[in-house]
Image (cartoon, grey):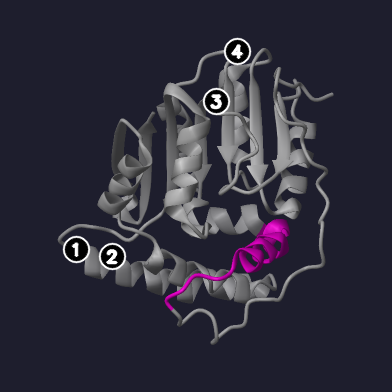
């Protein structure tokens, strides 16, 4: 049985609403500076859903679980509050948020890839007591929530993949209550005296260790997407400026894993 919050939108069914869009074409899309179309990214994440958690463990040597706990702790939720996990994927952060808000609180896990949401829902079904999470298919650029609805939010490995980062940040700002915090966790380009060497290592690791395993699992094309998406993603200080432009009162960027990962902590 799902818990609901007064005035909350009804969750959508986790079913595709249209035929699967065109697949990403290796050698055609990735060398171009422009990001892929939203429907292509949506199709990509639907295809990788069965192996998403396995490859996340490999991408981070399992450290993503530590970083996600840090991200949730920075949000600082209390029992009974309402939280959003935007671009929730298979639900890691949403499940952690649910532990913070407890049975009297409510978490919304939103993603536009229905296959990832299906995995998340299955995971939540196995938890006892059942976490207070509503899973919704939706668009991070056009959130179907009232203004100032949430007490806190997380966004893990999603900002890098949206088609309009300023608009996504503006929507996140809109749905947060005054004083609410959000943590945005993602892969980043390092910014340090050794950034060139570290970025070369990051690229080598993705191409020579992650991609062969993705090939074995049948999703090489999909994981070839990561390297160019990191290259397009704004650096940490640029993310801070974008968040401030969206209206956030405080924005602090924390490099993780020698800057190969980063957490952007925001306060409305």
Task: Give the mark nearer the N terminus: 2 vs 4.
Answer: 4
In contact (CB < 8 Å): disc 4 and disc 1? no
The stretch in magenta equals: 33-51
Q: Which residue is mark 4?
A: 80
Q: Is residue 3 left or right of residue 214?
A: right
Please give the name of the residue rendered at 24% of the width and 69% of the height, measured from the top-left corner.
197
Q: At which x and y percent is residue 219? A: 66, 71
Task: Give the mark nearer the N terminus: 3 vs 2.
Answer: 3
Q: Which residue is mark 2?
A: 198
Asked whether residue 175 is in view, the answer is: yes
| Quadrant of the rendered image containing residue 67 | top left
Please give the name of the residue rendered at 45% of the width and 81% of the height, measured from the top-left corner.
32
Q: At which x and y percent is residue 92? A: 60, 39
Q: Which residue is mark 3?
A: 150
| Discs 3/4, front | 3
Task: Give the mark nearer the N terminus: 3 vs 4.
Answer: 4
Packing grade of label 2 (10 A; few <14, some 14-19, many >=20) is some
Asked whether residue 258 is in view, the answer is: no
Please give the name of the residue rendered at 57% of the width and 69% of the height, measured from the top-left corner.
223
Q: Secondary structure at mark 2?
A: helix
Relative height, residue 4 to residue 139 (above, below): above
The numbered mark at residue 194 is 1
């Amino acid at each position: 049985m799902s818990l609901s919050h007064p005035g909350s939108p009804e969750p959508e069914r986790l079913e595709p609403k249209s035929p699967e869009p065109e697949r990403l074409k290796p050698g055609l899309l990735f060398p171009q500076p422009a990001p892929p179309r939203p429907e292509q990214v949506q199709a990509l994440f639907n295809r990788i859903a069965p192996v998403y958690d396995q490859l996340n463990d490999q991408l981070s040597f399992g450290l993503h679980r530590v970083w996600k706990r840090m991200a949730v702790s920075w949000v600082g939720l209390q029992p009974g509050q309402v939280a959003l996990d935007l671009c929730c994927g298979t639900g890691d952060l949403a499940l952690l948020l649910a532990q913070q808000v407890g049975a009297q609180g409510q978490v919304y896990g939103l993603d536009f890839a229905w296959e990832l949401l299906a995995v998340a829902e299955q995971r939540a079904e196995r938890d006892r007591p059942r976490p207070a999470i509503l899973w919704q298919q939706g668009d991070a650029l056009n959130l179907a929530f009232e203004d100032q609805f949430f007490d806190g939010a997380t966004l893990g490995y999603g900002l890098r993949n949206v088609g309009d980062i300023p608009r996504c940040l503006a929507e996140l700002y809109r749905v947060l209550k005054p004083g609410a915090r959000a943590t945005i966790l993602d892969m980043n380009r390092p910014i340090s005296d050794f950034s060139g060497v570290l970025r070369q290592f990051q690229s080598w690791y993705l191409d020579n260790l992650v991609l062969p395993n993705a090939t074995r699992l049948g999703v090489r094309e999909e994981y070839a997407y990561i390297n160019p998406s990191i290259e397009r993603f704004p650096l940490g200080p640029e993310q801070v400026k974008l968040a401030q432009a969206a209206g956030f009162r405080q924005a602090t960027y924390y490099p993780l894993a020698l800057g190969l990962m980063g957490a952007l902590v925001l306060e409305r």
